[in-house]
Amino acid sequence: MEKIRIALADDHQLFRNGLKILLGGYPEFEVVAEASNGTELLKVLENCPTDIVLMDINMPEMDGVEATSRISRQIPEVFVIALSMYGEEEYYYRMVEAGAKGFILKDSDISDVHDAIIAVHRGGNYFSQELLYHVIRRIKNREQEEKSSNLSRREKEILFKICEGLSNHEIAEELFISKRTVDKHRANLLAKTGSKNTASLILYAIKNRLIEV
């Protein structure tokens, strides 16, 4: 089986070392590169084929937001998963807009990191449920502009199912409609909300209080 090639971007070497050791316990993973900031990472990726980057948000010289944005534009075949800590919620939306496919907390169990890498490598998204809970708690304490009035009842229903992590096929089965209909509603949701992908849709739902945890 071809291994998933992973790059670690974090300015704390001890953290990188520990994560590398833990990832080494999975035969399907191979850590092929390390970097202490975004500038260094981009240089490394020029000559090192990589599938997944585990990206710290706060780094010197070039932070994770800018590095993720450049990777999305220059080497879109490389997927980024953000490594985050509590108190960094202001960066989450910027990371999604930059192209991050997932978020995991730095104190997550290694099994969560494994699941995130597998999900994103397969073309999906992965959000730590604990992280989403804390983001939602922060948002509940702020005034949010209501932007969901242009969504139909069925679109909101499908958006909720998307946030639950269901595929289009699973949504179709639950709502007793065709997959083609779900595909059309998902496309409409992306267009109406100005979202680029599933990750953006989830954050749209959070920011507009359409889902609860």
Image: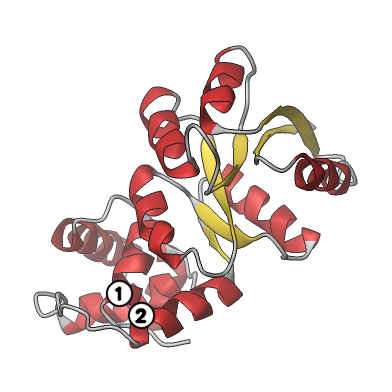
- Earlier sequence position, callout 2 versus callout 1: 2
Task: Give the labeled residue for mark 2.
Answer: 139
Horizontal side of 44 relative to 203 (left or right) equals right
**Given the image, on which type of amino acid does mark 1 rest?**
Lys
Considering depth in this image, is 174 or 142 the residue closer to the camera? 142
- Which residue does the image show at 30% across and 66% down from the upper left? 182
Q: Is residue 2 visible?
A: no
The residue furthest left is 150
Q: Is residue 208 visible?
A: yes
- Which residue does the image show at 18% across and 61% down from the upper left? 188
Horizontal side of 176 relative to 156 (left or right) equals right
**Given the image, on which type of amino acid does mark 2 rest?**
Ile
Asked if the residue at tag 1 contacts the one at tag 2, i.e. Cβ–Cβ closer than 8 Å, the answer is: yes
Q: Residue 207 bears which disc, if any?
A: 1
**Image location (x, y in percent) of residue 154:** 22, 80
Against 5, residue 106 (above or below) is below
Q: Residue 115 bears which disc, if any?
A: none
